Image (cartoon, rainbow, N blue to C red):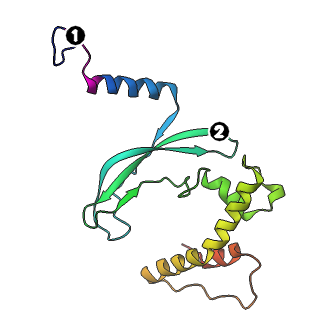
């Protein structure tokens, strides 16, 4: 018998009952916990991040299968900004796997096998083309930060934004 505030009632204390409900829920759902193996610095100021909680994040695969991820919420000890620890398979602010979004953005619509409707795929393409300038600037900034010379631009104009982004990649 569990002891709580009133020993005569024999009720289960709230923390134990909450843990029981959580474990019951985890047994019924396929859940993946996301946690980085090495310490991750704050992307804004480079200081240490501390865990302040977690949140559930739904992820849809290319086949349409739904998975649930438990993402850690982290707060910077210096600037106090909150960040979420996302794995490589997740695109920020998108519900589909990164491979799904990448396939739709890089291939013609007729060839994509993503389990998404046409309007969603159109929005992904529009989103990517709107982000191209920002992404190119970020790649150039990273190259400058690591003292690498950006690859010279070709004299022939590229056909798509993918060509220009692929042009910025550096061989390792």
- Residue at 62% x, 44% y is 60
At 42% from the left and 80% from the top, the residue drawn is 145
Looking at the picture, tell me which residue is in the foreground, 35 or 67. 67
- Please give the residue where the numbered disc 1 appears in the rendered image: 10
Quarter of the view holding residue 152: bottom right
Q: Which residues are magenta?
A: 9-16
Secondary structure that dominates the magenta span: loop
**Residue 83 appears in which quarter of the rendering?**
bottom left
Return the disc, 2 or 1, that comes first in the chain's sequence.
1
Observer-side mark, 2 or 1, equals 1
Q: Nearer the viewer, residue 16 or 7?
A: 7
User: Which mark is on residue 65?
Assistant: 2
Query: In the rendered structure, does residue 13 fall within the stretch colored magenta?
Result: yes
For the residues bearing labels 2 and 1, Cβ distance under 8 angstroms: no
Q: How many angstroms separate mark 2 from mark 1 (CA)?
A: 43 Å
Q: Is residue 39 left or right of residue 172?
A: left
In the image, residue 40 sits, relative to residue 45, either above or below, namely above
Disc 2 residue crowd, few under 14, some 14–19, many 20+, Cα 10 Å: few
Q: Is residue 55 above or below residue 85?
A: above
Q: Is residue 6 above or below residue 172?
A: above
Asked whether 102 falls inside the magenta stretch, the response is no
155 on left or right of 43: right
Count how many numbered circles sit on residues in the image. Answer: 2
Confirm whether residue 105 shows in the render. Answer: yes
């Amino acid at each position: 018998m569990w002891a709580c505030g009133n020993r005569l009632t024999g009720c289960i204390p709230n923390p134990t009952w909450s843990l029981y409900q959580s474990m019951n829920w985890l047994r019924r759902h396929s859940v993946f916990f996301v946690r980085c193996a090495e310490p991750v610095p704050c992307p804004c100021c480079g200081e240490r991040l501390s865990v302040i909680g977690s949140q559930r994040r739904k992820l849809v695969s290319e086949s349409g299968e739904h998975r649930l991820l438990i993402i850690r919420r982290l707060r910077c000890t210096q600037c106090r900004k909150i960040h979420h620890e996302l794995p490589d398979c997740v695109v920020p602010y998108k519900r589909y796997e990164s491979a799904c979004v990448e396939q739709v953005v890089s291939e013609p619509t007729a060839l994509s096998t993503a389990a998404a409707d046409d309007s969603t795929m159109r929005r992904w393409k529009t989103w990517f083309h709107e982000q191209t300038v920002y992404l190119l600037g970020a790649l150039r900034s990273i190259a400058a930060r690591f003292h690498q010379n950006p690859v010279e631009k070709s004299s022939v104009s590229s056909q798509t934004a993918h060509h220009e982004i692929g042009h910025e990649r550096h061989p390792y």
